[in-house]
């Protein structure tokens, strides 16, 4: 499945600007298949299941102005989910990237309210 890197880069920059992120640093985004993301999920989070996105904040407290993160996205899951949700694989990929970065920026989706806030932000930055 082709990844439209320039589109994703623009969406990430829109999100960082919209969230008023003033940090320097980097965000690595890796696109993998379900098998590979399952390996990462098992290794780092103890969950052997496949998932759509994993987000790792690698920033250090001693450098508060520096953002470092790894986002791992299953392109295979995006393709599968696009059929279920009647979207496109491209849309799902963008959604997963945005979702992962929102987690890095401190957003969560463990409660109904937090999930609603996160969904609103996702729509804002993916569209």
Image: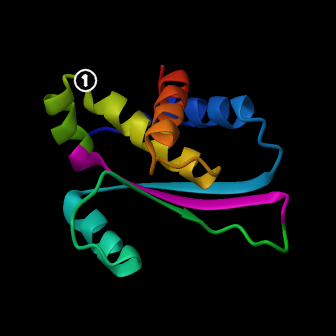
Q: Residue at x 63, y 69 (%)?
A: 58
Q: Is residue 47 left or right of residue 5?
A: left
| Magenta extent | 64-77
Q: Residue at x 36, y 38 (%)?
A: 93
Rendered location of residue 14, percent (x, y): 65, 29
Q: How many marks?
A: 1
Rendered location of residue 101, percent (x, y): 56, 47
Task: Name which quarter of the figure residue 2 lies in.
Answer: top left
Task: Bin the neighbour count of mark 1 within 10 Å (Cα to Cα): few under 14, some 14-19, many 20 and up.
Answer: few
Rendered location of residue 50, percent (x, y): 23, 61
Q: In the rendered image, which residue does mark 1 sit on?
A: 87
Please say if 125 is above or below 72. Answer: above
In which quadrant is the N terminus drawn?
A: top left
Q: Residue furthest front?
A: 112
Name the image colouring: rainbow
Instruction: Indicate whether residue 66 is drawn in magenta.
Output: yes
Magenta stretch: dominant SS?
A: strand
Q: Residue at x 33, y 30 (%)?
A: 90
Rendered location of residue 17, percent (x, y): 73, 32
Per the image, label 1 sits on a secondary structure element best described as loop
Please say if 59 is above or below 109. Answer: below
């Amino acid at each position: 499945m082709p990844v439209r890197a320039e589109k994703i880069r623009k969406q990430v920059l829109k999100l960082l600007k919209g969230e008023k992120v003033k940090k320097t640093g980097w965000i690595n985004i890796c696109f993998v298949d379900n098998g590979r993301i399952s390996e990462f999920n098992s290794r780092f989070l103890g969950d052997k299941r496949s998932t759509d996105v994993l987000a790792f904040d690698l920033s250090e407290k001693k450098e508060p102005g520096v953002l470092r993160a790894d986002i791992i996205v299953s392109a295979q899951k995006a393709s599968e989910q696009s059929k279920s949700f009647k979207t496109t694989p491209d849309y799902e990929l963008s959604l997963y990237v945005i979702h992962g970065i929102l987690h890095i920026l401190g957003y969560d989706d463990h409660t109904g309210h937090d999930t609603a806030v996160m969904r609103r932000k996702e729509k804002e930055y993916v569209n």
